[in-house]
Image (cartoon, helix red, strand yellow):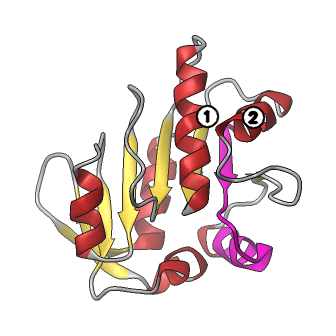
């Protein structure tokens, strides 16, 4: 497994629920009690300690800051990054040459984040949901998938993420 979850600054129970909904077991989760989620160096160090070779980062909120920086550093040091899946990482620019998929809690956040770079399919909730709910209850976040090519599709955040994880070989079913 090369999937590394980078949660934000919130209760670990939200991440546990997120993993249950998506069927992520086992999964490598950045321990935010010892590693700052917004620190690229902490995430890079953690990924290396775990022996990851081609990481796929799935990050939320402040975790997107750290994951994007870690992915960029990983690539700058000669490594390959499968993708970064950024869940509500508003304001975080696309720094590297790897696929970036953004999920946003509303259309406005999606539009503003797209200015900072995208590199793959993206999703926004419609109707909007609360920031934390996008992580804690992705199956309840109905919205729109915006593929790089092809028509828009109605889906929910959980199905969108599962599709990405299957695409990158990080989820079997």
Nearest to the observer: residue 33 or residue 57: 33
Query: Was residue 5 drawn as part of the magenta stretch in this picture?
Result: yes
Circle 2/circle 1 CB separation < 8 Å: yes
**Label for residue 70?**
1
**Residue 166 in the image: x percent, y percent?**
49, 49
**Residue 41 in the image: x percent, y percent?**
71, 34
Q: Residues within 10 Å of mark 1 (few under 14, many from 20)?
A: many
Nearest to the observer: residue 17 or residue 68: 68
Element carrying mark 2: helix
- Quadrant occupied by the N terminus: top right
Q: Residues within 10 Å of mark 2 (few under 14, many from 20)?
A: many
Determine the CA span between mark 2 and mark 1: 9 Å
Residue 57 is at least partly visible in this image:
no
Q: Classify 54 as above or below 79.
A: below
Query: Was residue 154 drawn as part of the magenta stretch in this picture?
Result: no
**Residue 139 in the image: x percent, y percent?**
49, 81
Looking at the rendering, the stretch of residues picked out in magenta corresponds to 1-20
Which residue is located at x 78 percent, y 32 percent? Answer: 45
Which residue is located at x 59 percent, y 17 percent? Answer: 79
Which residue is located at x 56 percent, y 36 percent? Answer: 69
Labels 2 and 1: the sequence-earlier one:
2
- Quadrant occupied by the C terminus: bottom right
Residue 44 is at least partly visible in this image:
yes
Q: Classify 95 as above or below 115.
A: above
Circle 2 sits on which residue?
47
**Label for residue 144?**
none
Q: Quadrant of residue 91?
A: bottom left
Which residue is located at x 65 percent, y 38 percent? Answer: 40
In this image, 139 relative to 149: left or right?
Answer: right
């Amino acid at each position: 497994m090369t999937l590394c979850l980078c949660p934000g600054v919130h209760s670990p129970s939200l991440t546990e629920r997120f993993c249950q909904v998506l069927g992520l077991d086992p999964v490598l989760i950045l321990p935010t009690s010892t590693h700052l989620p917004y620190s690229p160096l902490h995430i890079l160090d953690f990924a290396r300690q775990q022996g990851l070779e081609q990481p796929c980062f799935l990050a939320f909120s402040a975790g997107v800051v750290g994951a994007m920086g870690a992915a960029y550093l990983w690539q700058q040091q000669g490594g390959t990054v499968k993708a970064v899946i950024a869940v509500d990482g508003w304001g975080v620019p696309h720094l590297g040459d790897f696929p970036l998929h953004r999920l946003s809690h509303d259309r406005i956040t999606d539009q503003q984040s797209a200015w900072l770079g995208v590199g793959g399919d993206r999703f926004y909730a419609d109707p909007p949901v609360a920031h934390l709910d996008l992580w804690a209850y992705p199956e309840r976040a109905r919205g729109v998938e915006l593929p790089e090519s092809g028509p828009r599709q109605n889906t929910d955040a959980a199905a969108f993420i599962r599709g990405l994880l299957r695409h990158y070989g990080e989820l079997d079913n």
